[in-house]
Image (spheres, helix red, strand yellow):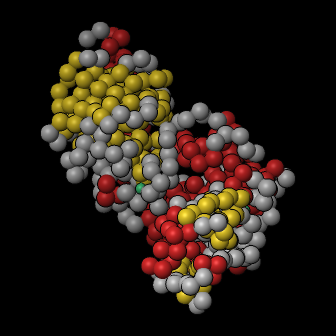
Amino acid sequence: MKIESYRRLCCGLAAYFLTFSLCAQKVSVGLFFDVPVKSATLAVQSGSYAVIVDDTLLIAAIDKGASMQLLSNSGGVRLRISGENTGTFASVKVVGMGDEGTFSILCHNPPLPMRSYAQHAFVRSARDGSGLLIINQLDEHFYLSGVVEAETGCTAKPEFFKTQAILSRTYLYAHFNRHGKDGFNLCDGVHCQAYKGLLTRCRRIRAAVGETEGTIVIDREKRPITPSFHANCGGQTCHSENVWREKLPYLRSIRDEHCKYQVGARWQKRIALSEWRDYMSKNGIRVKNPRQLEFEQPLRKKYYEVNGKKVELTKVRHRFGLRSTFFDVRIAGGEALLTGKGYGHGVGLCQEGAMQMAEKGMTCENILRHYYKNTRLISFSQALSTTVMQQDSMLFLFNPWRNELPDTTTFVDDVVSQDSAELQN
Ligand SMILES: [Zn+2]
Ligand SMILES: [Zn+2]
């Protein structure tokens, strides 16, 4: 073996073992989880990568421009590198040397837009045999930057990005093992948190993630909150139980002046009276005079109510594809004219309101306290270096396919309880 090849082999192996033994706070994200991917091309965009098949080093280092085709093939992954068939394997790991590097994934079947990702990729057959399971394993801060950008774009003030970074991290820590049985931590869809890879690599977002490192929001019970948010509340947020079943003490309806003049603050929709009347009639609201179907909610209500008969506003919203449940109804000219406020389910943080608060110079803590009642921020950065969570992550690193991770809910309580005295003050 030539010295150079030998050196590259050693580097590859060293990178592999370093990656799987030293790095903490990695997140494994199941990509395209709802889509049965049959074939895809993975191309190196920066850095050097080792390719490991069935736990054996196949290639010590491939560099920028190199690409590999991954095909689902009778319960395994058929791998072609630069056009050459290398075989079918149970697993293919593409490991960035020194924990660095970026790569793109272009799905051919089904065709999906190309996306870029940081650090590592693991590929194997999906458990249900429907196609490939592609996992992106990466540092928490890369993952959170991707999530924040997918949710917000790149133009707001830093305190708004810090707010979103804290919420995304709160979700991550509280649901770290949501897909443990699938062999990874979280999926990249809205089932968990939308994650579309590196996107434009917005510097402000990366800085916000760094500046809030380890910080999450907890409730009075010292648990990470459910960090729900929506585009615009229309001037008043919703109680959680008015939208979902669960009543959460921090997801209370509040008045919000900050979002009033923003894009999502107002809407209108016209619906044929016959359609509106038919739907209401099927839901037990029958009227002789259509004008009786008129409805007002100066403050948010849970039900559309006429003559003591009612239907849940969330149901009406879903049926007619409305922007929000916060609307009035006028009947005129054979139509139901809906005049509404806000965009989204209305529970938790109002993004357009939060952006305006950041514009006015308020801190992420002010913003979070405004929308989530009786909560506080804590930092996990200290705790993470010594707790069960890191051990979980390490176990996960050694075997990203394992499906028996401990329940992380326990660790969250254990860690936060150290902080309880402060919370009560
Ligand atoms: Zn998910
Ligand atoms: Zn609002």
Image-quadrant location for residue 369: bottom right
Query: Residue shown at 70%/76% (left/top)?
Result: 297
Furthest residue to the right?
360
Furthest residue to the front?
333
Q: Specify the quadrant that holds the N terminus.
A: top left
Answer with left or right where residue 155 lies relative to residue 216: right
What x and y, as percent, mark residue 81?
28, 21
Furthest residue to the left?
74
What x and y, as percent, mark residue 25?
50, 49
Answer with left or right where residue 172 lies relative to residue 153: left
What x and y, as percent, mark residue 408?
44, 65
In this rendering, does residue 409 appear at all?
Answer: yes
Furthest residue to the top?
2
In this rendering, does residue 377 appear at all?
Answer: no
Q: Quadrant of ligand 1?
A: bottom left
Q: Specify the quadrant that holds the C terminus.
A: bottom right
Query: Residue shown at 32%/52% (left/top)?
Result: 183
What x and y, as percent, mark residue 375?
68, 71
Query: Residue shown at 72%/69% (left/top)?
Result: 236
Q: How many marks?
A: 0
Answer with left or right where residue 131 lies relative to residue 393: left
Above or below for 259 versus 206 = below
Q: Nearer the viewer, residue 15 or 179?
A: 179
Above or below for 348 versus 92 = below
Image-quadrant location for residue 350: bottom right
Query: Residue shown at 48%/80% (left/top)?
Result: 281
